[in-house]
Amino acid sequence: MAIKQLSETLINQIAAGEVIERPASAAKELIENALDAGATRIEIATAGGGKTLLRVTDNGAGMQPADLELAVKRHCTSKLDDNLFDIRTLGFRGEALPSIGSVSRLSITTRTAGATEGAVISIAGGRTDPVRPSPANTGTVVEVRDLFFATPARLKFMKSEKAEASAISDVVRRMAIAFPKVRFVLSGSDRTTLEFPATGDDRLARMAQVLGKEFRDNAIEIDAEREDIQLTGFAGVPTYNRGNSLQQYVFVNGRPVQDKQLLSAIRAAYSETIPHGRYPVAVLSIALDPALVDVNVHPAKSDVRFRDPGLIRGLIIGAIREALAREGDRASTTGASGMMQAFRAEQFRQRQPWSAETSPYRPTHFETMVRGLSETPQASFSAFSAPSARTASPLPEPDRTVADAPAPQSFPLGAVRAQLHENYIVAQTQDGLVIVDQHAAHERLVFETMRTALHSKPIAAQALLIPEIVDLSEDDCDRLMTHAQELGRLGLGIERFGPGAIAVRETPAMLGEMDAAGLVRQLADEIAEWDTANGLASRLEYLAATMACHGSVRSGRRMRAEEMNALLRQMEATPGSGQCNHGRPTYIELKLSDIERLFGRS
């Protein structure tokens, strides 16, 4: 078969299949062109999820008629010289406009600041009309109609209008975070408008616009530099997390990217503070010499390649962990919000009134009392009367050691006032109260002690008077004994005890009494799941977390006031004590102003 030259239209359609995957891809390319043109105001209008209409209007520099004619031809660009390793603009290939024009009805109207009139050019399915004069404001208006009408097969792969519109919204949000000095307005056919006013140099204010005002209250500033590579941005406290990774934004030299290696570094930085299945919230910006990063590795420019990826990964992990150690112990404000929501009276008012004819449920004494308030004064009075002696139960004596506890003074976590259900510690601070999960808090403290021991002297062990024999399979025994030395540093002394058994002779002294057999079985299961030729060195902290969970203060244990106060003081001095090893919060803080709102005092 003879080789032939493809037509220009077909070449553009092939390129469109790589560059323009969906309406959101077209929106991204057009917004990047507007930003490269110096626009400070960008308006995006859509219909049919961007498939029917996509219009991007900017107040940028605009184009001359001669430049407009070249702009819709392949590989024509004003953003790239002869050096592909010094890219300082968002766009550079010169493929977006001809690719969009080959599969849609495209029109571009533009005018420069000094021109007396504008110009317009139209393309329909790859056929280009001549440039003609047109009235226009300074800037450019790019209108895309009937996207993929020239390639009907591509339309079959499009998602619903709502899904496509959501993808465009995500593109606008990413661009808005990257360029806080630009005003973005997104309007759709459902008459909803998404607007992000310019915030100037206040990047956190723009992030609050996009991610919600709660992000401002739960964000930790990141500012680190290594070998002329600067990392800035904000990362959420570990207890402020989400069910997906959609609120993780990374920018490289101002370019929004969705690089898997960078997102993996964020996950690694939070690996021991976020529960499984939850994701942190972070906005990070990497600034480096353009020669050290290749942005020309993906048609959509969403992936990048660094000359030294290990350096970038280490910088991200180190900077986030340093920030978490510095400020990450504070409780997320969402905990207090959830508590406030649980206390709201609307939930009680929504209850259906009890009826003896319709429900077998019997009202409590409190519900009978409240219902009696709407009856006669005598009935109301009787509702408040004490229950009979036959049903009354004596009240417990107050715990004097808690009641006589010292004033909160300047302790961040305050002074203990009570223990509820033998599991939750209530402490009073200067401006509110703190509720601590005693098991989760102590688990974190034990883990930090064990982790410190991994890098210094071994943890003290206590010998068992009678060794505990644990029956296991031969494979599990072999795996455990392979790592017996590492486990010994954690205070767990084990040895073989005949075929299919392990003898536990020592346990960590700091854990006291514990279920040694249960711990050994769990460790055997975990080692079997992820053990590799690299050994256990990279996962010792994970084992330390498992051992800490088994030996921490259990729920249901009644503690003395001195013990509880000591636990609070140790939490204040321990990095990462705001969440347990599994990422759950160890305490919730409720401000006095929140409590006053509950009672209508504010």
Image: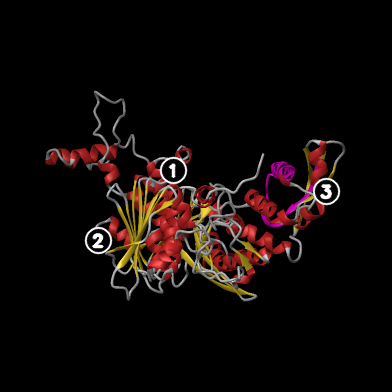
* Mark 3 surroundings within 10 Å by alpha-carbon count, few (fewer than 14), some (14 through 19), many (20 or more): few
The spot of residue 500 in percent (x, y) is: 83, 36
In the displayed image of the protein, which residue is found farthest to the right? 498
Type of amino acid at the residue the image marks with label 3: Thr
The x, y position of residue 473, in whole percent, is: 79, 35
* Residue 150 marker: 1
| Quadrant for the N terminus in the image | top right
- Badge 2, how many Cα within 10 Å: few under 14, some, many 20+? few
- Magenta range is 502-529
C-alpha separation, residue under disc 2 versus residue under disc 1 = 65 Å
* Dots 3, 2 in contact, CB < 8 A: no
Q: Which mark is residue 486?
A: none
Dividing the image into 4 quarters, which one contains the C terminus?
bottom left
* Front-lying residue, 515 or 8: 8
Q: Main secondary structure of the magenta part?
A: helix
Question: For the residues carrying marks 2 and 1, which lies nearer the camera in this image?
Answer: 1
Label 1 SS: loop
Q: Say which mark, if any, is on residue 601.
A: 2
Residue 561 located left or right of residue 509: left
Observer-nearest residue: 259 or 563?
259
Q: Amino acid at mark 1?
A: Ala
